[in-house]
Amino acid sequence: MSLLVEPSDVLPLVDVEIAFRVGSLQDPVGKEGLAQLTGHLLRRGPRGMSQQRFEDELATLGARASVEVSMRTTRVRATVLRRNLEPLLNLLARMLWRPALRARDYDQLLRQAQASLTARLDDDQTLGALSFRSALFGAHPYARTLSGTESSIARIDVERVRAFYRRHLENGDFVVGIAGAVTELEARALVASHFPAHRPRKRRAEKLPAPRMRRGRHVVVVDKPERSQTQLFIGTLGARTHDPKLFPLIVSNTAFGGTFSSPLMQEVRGVRGWSYGAYSRLLHSTQRDAWYMWTAPSAEYSAACAALQLELLERWVDRGIKGSELRFSQQYLINSHCFDRDTPSKRLEAKLDVELLGIPRRYVAEHDRLIGGVTRDQANEATRARISPRNLTIVVVATAADVVPSFEALPDVTSMEIVPFDRT
Amino acid sequence: MVAPELLVERLNRGVSKRNARWTFLHEHAFGDALAMRRFRLGNGLTLLTLVDRSAPTVSYHTWFRVGSRHERPGKTGLAHLFEHLMFNATRTRPLGQFDRLLEGAGAEANAATWTDWTYYYENAPRGALPLLVELEADRMSNLVLRAPQVVSEKEVVANERKLRVEDDIEGKALELLYATAFRRHPYGWPTIGWMKDIRGFTVRDCRQFYRTHYAPANATVIVAGDFDEGRALGLVQEHYGGLPKVGAVVPVAQPKEPPQRAERITQLRAPTPSEKILLGYQAPAFCHPDTSALVVVNELLFGGRSSRMHRALCVDEELAFAVRGSIAPFVDPGLFEMWIFVHEGKRRQAALERLEGEIEQLASAGPMQSELDKAINQLELSFLHSMETAGGKAEQIGFYETVAGDGSAMFDRLDAYREVTPDDVERVATKYLRPSRRTRVEVVRGHG
């Protein structure tokens, strides 16, 4: 166990995070959603305490807690009024190391998880984002959704959850982070008196295969009735965290579609008024994660908007960014970096990411130098090397009848698939 | 920090124009470390400052006392469209320069409009304050309003409406709720405006709106974060001091809603997999003395997983998979909104009856003191969260200044919650949460 502390005496508030290096990538194939169900069942409280009493105790302390599962981590996050920090730590320790994991709580949790999956169908942007990852990554684990699917979670019973807990969390290594109105000395004493000192089991380092680039331009229409607006995701594989081209690509992507005044936003929204928002995002992980553009144009000009984005993308990759764009992007990234650390919890989060996700320490410590040191040639070369306009996944959430012919007519489309929205 | 009287005296020395002279009005302390100070410029601009050096950032807010309540039928959505137009060219800066300069400085800029107000903000690194003052003062008086920008922004807003209302079930249900609940008051039309009205705006409408509402005396500037107060006052004096004193817009008394004597029920058909119920109980204005007790009622009923509604509807009987409640913080009486997201296979009516049962229980027996303490601890936590960043503090001050008439009222909020008793809870639940005072929107499966 290691402890990270970020003291601040500004407000009588403390954030606590207890993080494990296990996430949805550990879900067995066909049982996607297992890590998240385990985290959510843990959150129902410790042995000897009903779910309701646990909730009442937390709320009475002036605390909130959640268990958040990502691809690679399970994080218990809580925030509490300073005066109640110690009882909160005690409660969290009991929740984590003496969990109830009751069968009847699990049955209810499963029904709620199914209902949440159904409710997700109301949210077009989420539908588009999930369909995009699924189409881009195919059979690769990065395509998995954290919550699984109706059929995958139906295959998980409480014994499976308990086994997952025993295997990955009960004796697993963990990191504790505490930020806010507490000194390092106090934090150390509190953690030592409430949390177990584990001898962690050795875990083999995860070896994920690299995702395969799908050749060509593939369109997926997520068909939903009565859509006046469409959700449009266009993208391809991006970069790895340890990619030497990561920082040049961050700078280049920011210049292309990372700010309100970037060409992507200006051409789509400023000049044409076609979408309320337009941006490009670069994600990175141990293997190449996604790079994508998002817009939400009206159905009537959705394909025209897609065509414009493809043109802008090709121009960006072929011609690169100008020197003035490079400098602007660097200025923006360096100057706005203060908002990544303007609260104790954000400063803690950055430290935890280094500890948990294998992000090189210098990415945080030398952020400004790494951004400021990118040259125009490096930025443009990274863009050409990593972003492929020929190999794209295009996902549009729309009423299929309104958009299929116009999307088929987009340049170089290799395939077109129509998926009913309630079968995504 | 320098005494405010001295600052003002120093800055007014040699300033002959009355519009550019400062007056210090008062100071309100919050704990040992923070204090909000109120200043006024001769042209009527109010400036509220709060120095907090916990992070090297500064937040600059400009709140105008204009929102959708100041519109009229046929011109709904103008305040919101105008919010978009404020990011366009000015007489001194071409289109796009506003955002480019701010982003280059590392600042984030945005704006929001609701029924009673419109506000603009920038969150920036501390060194960017001079740029923020210059740009905001410029667009308060020099905005250029021409056809190409108005046409383009109308299209953006039409798209925003499709995104947030037409294709969004919750947005559509809320619009229907307010249109059904308010028959006379402007709260009945949506802040984003009806689509027909958005399409119909002219450049002339926009110019007239700008002249009427965008003046120093109708605005409050809030600066919070890590900055030098004397320098900030000097910058505001320099850039706003030349603006004329135009009389503050006289608040127009809005038509009163006739008393509601029976529940109003309407249905919304939508391609949704899960049915929903949205209720709106007539609630008092934000400044009404009963609002604090109603906020506590909301926390008791809907505040997280230990709340009464969550336990009753989502856990005990599993009639719903989520519930939510909130009180519209409006200048005039608004609505106490409640959402029930009904579980598949469960009856809407059963969920509604359970919710009513919980309200009746609270209204007749009140909460135990321990339950009340729990709710107040949760409200304290929310309050502290809202104060974490410079932007959060500026937003809270701006909201209280514009809706409650005093930005420092935010600091008294927790004390007001702490004074709420179990009897108060019973009284306001009985008074406000009667079915005859509510409007109901039922979201059912089907095609609209």
Image (tube, coloured by chain):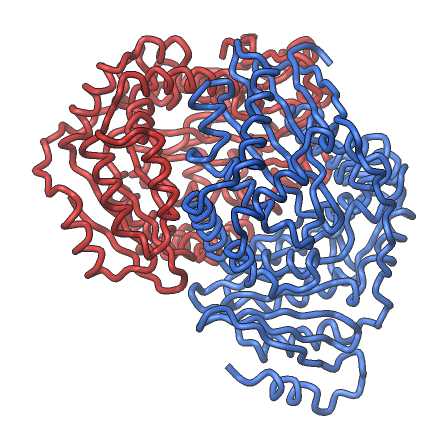
Chain colours: A red, B blue
Residue B182 placement, left or right of B292: right
Residue B246 placement, left or right of B358: right
Is B429 placed above or below A216 here?
A: below
- Which residue occupies the foreground of this view, A126 or B285? B285
**Would you say residue B162 is visible in this rendering?**
no
What residue do we see at 28% from left, 31% from top? A45
Residue A404: which quarter of the image? top right
- Which residue occupies the foreground of this view, A130 or A171? A171
Residue A83 placement, left or right of A312: left
**Would you say residue A267 is visible in this rendering?**
yes
Q: Position of residue A295 (x, y in %)?
A: 61, 30
Name of the residue lying farthest toward the left? A199
Is A236 placed above or below B189 here?
A: above
Q: Position of residue A158 (x, y in %)?
A: 26, 15
- Which residue occupies the foreground of this view, B329 or B175? B329
Is B344 placed above or below B223 here?
A: above
- Total labels: the figure holds 0
Residue A77 placement, left or right of B169: left
Q: Position of residue A374 (x, y in %)?
A: 40, 50
Residue B237: which quarter of the image? bottom right
Residue B43: which quarter of the image? bottom right
Name of the residue lying farthest toward the right? B204
- Which residue occupies the foreground of this view, A114 or B56? A114
What residue do we see at 67% from left, 61% from top? B401
